[in-house]
Image (tube, rainbow, N blue to C red):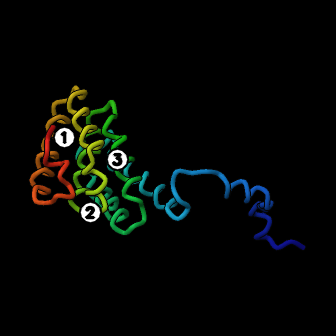
Amino acid sequence: MTPIWDLKRPKTVICPSSLLALASTPTSTPAMFRSSTSSFDRLLEKATSQLLLEPDWQSTMAINDLIRGGEVPPRYAVSAVKKRFYSDNPHVALYALQVMESCVKNCGSLVHEEVATKAFMEELRDLVKRSQDDAVKRKVLEMIQNWGMAFRNSQKYRIVTVSD
């Protein structure tokens, strides 16, 4: 006789070939970061939601904790936040800029090394040129100015303080 608890739950059979196929599937993130990046993505979506009336600082700080704790690679985090800069909704772009600003202020050199690159600074410059929203433009310029002041004594982050 089958116990009653077995009748309620369907049986799942996993064959070894499906495990092999799953394991060999290429991904952009190492296996050790997959669950953390999915929680990071959920937090980022929540922190930059177009439905927000004010910044979601709880989600933003949780994002910082994931990066500082090494659960999410800084390169992945910066790239994911950067994608939100280009949203058609200016509120989403502003919230993404606030998340990035918070990451730079709270995550230290992990994030500094990702944003203090010529490519990243050029993207910010292009964002200012392309954006139709004045608040987004002001926020980007404010961030660049603040980072320039913060990094002015560091040769390592010289690209932020030098303009071409």
Q: Amino acid at mark 3?
A: Val
Q: Residue at x 12, y 44 (%)?
A: 142
Element at label 2? helix
The answer to whether residue 3 is left or right of residue 25 is right
**Disc with the residue nearer the chain's start (3 vs 1):** 3
**Disc with the residue nearer the chain's start (1 vs 2):** 2
Taking the image as drawn, is residue 13 in sight?
Answer: no
The answer to whether residue 128 is left or right of residue 5 is left
Element at label 3? helix
Please tell me the numbered disc located at residue 81.
Answer: 3
Tell me where residue 164 appears, x and y as whole percent: 15, 37
Mark 1, residue position: 140
Tell me where residue 61 appears, x and y as whole percent: 29, 61
Tell me where residue 121 appears, x and y as whole percent: 24, 42
Q: Is residue 155 above or below residue 131?
A: below
**From mark 3 to mark 1, how far is it between C-alphas?**
14 Å
> 8 and 76: which one is in front?
76
